[in-house]
Image (tube, helix red, strand yellow):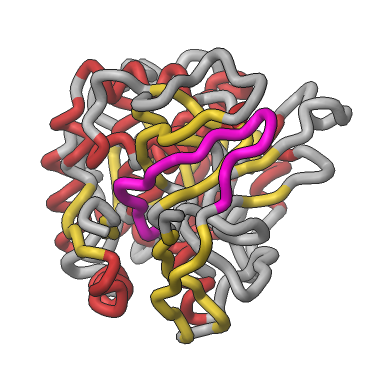
Amino acid sequence: MKKNVGLLLKGPGRMEVTQEELTPPHEGQVLIRIDNFNLCGSDLGIYDGTYSGPVNYPIYVGHEWAGTVEQVGPGITDLSEGDTVTGDCSLWCGSCEYCSKDKNLCEGIEKVGMTRNGAARRYFVQDAKYVYPAPEIPLGVLSLAEPLAVGSHAASVARKVMGDLANRRILILGGGNMGLSLLMILRKVSGCSAPEVYDPIPYRMEKAISLGGKTPDDLDYVSGQSPRASGGDYRHFYSNKAYDIVFESTGSHAAFPNALEIVKPLGGIGVIGFVPYAGENLRLITLKALKIWGTIGGTGEFPRVLEAIRRDPDYFEALVTHRFPYTDFSRAFETARNKEQALKVQISFSEA
């Protein structure tokens, strides 16, 4: 019987290469031969022991993955051996009240690579309902579908709250993986010509510009360096520098309070990052009659994201900056921490 090689994280900082017996798929499942998975901020937090969401150790991380169907279990008719596939991070029940509105908020939710073992293995068994076929998309790009789906979900919710996004003045706070994934979706799916991006790291700003983003004209204004009225005079709210929509993707202490300052009256703030308490001037929500919403997960967005990737794979692949074999996982995690040089770092099992 084939052995399953994997990267098991036994606790913070304690990852080991493992070999286990290969588990065949049961009814309703597929066995997937993993080509690669990407590291994101959640993976780094889980590896370092700083992740603020639920996590179960020991754990195989890996919720952004791509592979090929190796074997289908009984009852599977819509997937076949040899299909290139990717899949959900959120494991939803499909029957609760919340699933009828947003499967990413299922009341029995589990998360691949966080509370359930993920794809940091040569072979990965998954329920077929969480798996999406993606013919014609290279595996090295396909694993980006999950983070792009998270960005697409953020854009979809914004459209429901604020209406059409194409002609809005939009700023993304943060040029990391999440902010740039959202930028790509706004440009390629939502029809936004040049959303603005602000990040204090020059490398990230250069990348944002190369992907079609725009540098804000007044960096002091968007970075919080210029004086703030904070409700002292109503007329200060009507600056021509202010934005219709601000997306906060950093989770930093300063970014959300800053978003409240630089968004227009009747504007909106979409929150993607995990915002800690930061002493926000929350009265601006009332004084400006703002709309504020949070989004999490990407379930429900994969079909439109996969179509966007299929149309322009080279554009989306630009998010991947480094690739490492699974045996070099320590260097992969170290590289992913370097915000000055890395975005998506990919770990490959193609040679395992």
The furthest residue to the right: 97
Question: At x 34% / y 16%, what residue is drawn?
Answer: 307
Secondary structure character of the magenta stretch overall: strand
Instruction: Give the percent coordinates (x, y) of residue 18.
Output: 44, 73
Q: Quadrant of the N terminus?
A: bottom left
Closer-to-camera residue (49/137): 137
The boundaries of the magenta stretch are 23-39
Q: How many marks?
A: 0
Q: Quadrant of residue 39?
A: bottom left
Q: Quadrant of the C terminus?
A: bottom left
Instruction: Give the percent coordinates (x, y) of residue 222.
Output: 35, 53
Q: Can see residue 167?
A: no
26, above or below 205, in the image:
above
Q: Can see residue 308?
A: yes
Q: Residue 206 magenta-drawn?
A: no
Residue 337 appears left or right of 130: left
Q: Quadrant of residue 200?
A: bottom left
